[in-house]
Amino acid sequence: MAASTPPQMLLKSNLKQLRLPAILAEYEKLAREAAETDQDYEQYLLHLTELEVAARQSNALKARIKQAAFPVEKDFDTFDFAAAPFLQKQKILEMARGEWIDERFNCCLIGTAGTGKTHVATALALAACRQGRRVRFFTAASLVNRLEEAQKQYAVEKVLSQLDKTELLVCDELGYLSFSRTGAELLFQVFADRYERGSVLITSNLPFSEWGQIFQGERMTAALLDRLTHRCHISEMNGESYRFKESMKGKRRGRKK
Ligand code: ADP
Ligand code: MG
């Protein structure tokens, strides 16, 4: 740029080139504030860099959440632990701190329909995203589907290596649908591959004793359960369906009118 270009324009151009959009957006306003409040240069610069750092962190979090591909973003703030007496609240909130993922522990939430398994799984995974962890959420059916499609194109290894990069793999609704032999084998391979290398969070309506139905064959099921449950937080979530309870409340209220 020409030497006669005003400093303002040069500064803006530099901030763009250096990719500092938060500083670019805020520096003028903050400069006025700094003058008014007698801040020194370092305080001003610190303030600006804090804004940029915060913006980057927030963008990175958004990207991680997008990559996780949650069907619905459900968090603990909307989860009523009082309505889920079968859960150990303290244990779940401790798990939300994410250390189990560092330790490559797994988590299984097992129970009847509508008790909040998907909600809790999503909230735990969301917490992991906030801690900077790479997460991927699948339903068992969509994961098997992805693997089968990949196999048709001789690209299973590619999918496996993508999954390998995630620190937490969520597999929701295992057991609602049964898979083909190949599908079950591919899923087995994913879980077996992650053993002690990456965490898996599984939700299922089936107790472990019935997983033979999913993995067709007692030997494969036993081998899988052996690995999966070796280092694993298991919570049983059996109870009345939350949706059902809520809709009954609504009806009762309706009747009173
Ligand atoms: P599951 O996966 O066990 O079948 P979901 O997690 O899908 O159940 O829960 C069903 C619906 O009820 C969801 O909309 C969920 O947000 C809600 N829900 C379940 N349990 C609770 C709870 N304890 N507090 C608040 N909402 C809940
Ligand atoms: Mg569910």
Image (tube, rainbow, N blue to C red):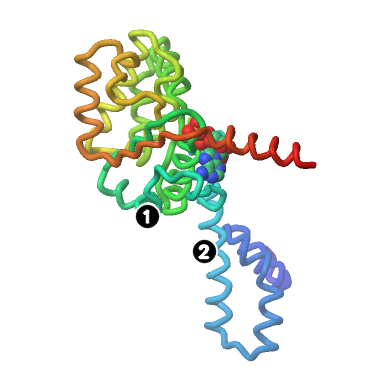
The quarter of the picture where the C terminus appears is top right
Q: Give the residue displayed 58% in from the left and 36% down from the top.
A: 245
Q: Give the residue displayed 53% in from the left and 76% down from the top.
A: 46
Q: Residue furthest front?
A: 256
The residue type indicated by label 2 comes to: Val
- Which residue is identified by label 2? 53
Quarter of the image for residue 211 reads: top left
The image shows residue 232, relative to residue 97, as above or below, that is: above
Classify residue 153 as left or right of residue 196: right
Quarter of the image for residue 224 reads: top left
Mark 1, Cα crowd under 10 Å, few <14 / some 14-19 / many 20+, is: few
Quarter of the image for residue 220 reads: top left
Residue 62: x and y, percent? 55, 48
Q: Does residue 74 appear anywhere in the picture? A: no
Q: Nearer the viewer, residue 131 or 86?
A: 86
Residue 39: x and y, percent? 60, 87
Q: Residue furthest bottom?
A: 38
Q: Secondary structure at mark 2?
A: helix
Is the CB of mark 1 within 8 Å of ligand 1? Answer: no
Q: Give the residue displayed 34% in from the left and 29% down from the top.
A: 161
Q: Nearer the viewer, residue 253 or 160?
A: 253
Q: Nearer the viewer, residue 148 or 45?
A: 148
Q: Residue furthest right?
A: 257
Whether pointer 2 and pointer 1 mark residues with C-beta atoms closer than 8 Å, the reply is no
Q: Does residue 252 appear anywhere in the picture? A: yes
The quarter of the picture where the N terminus appears is bottom right
- Which residue is identified by label 1? 90
The image shows residue 240, relative to residue 43, as above or below, that is: above
Residue 125: x and y, percent? 44, 43
Q: Secondary structure at mark 1?
A: helix
Residue 24: x and y, percent? 65, 65
Q: Earlier in the sequence, mark 2 or mark 1?
A: 2
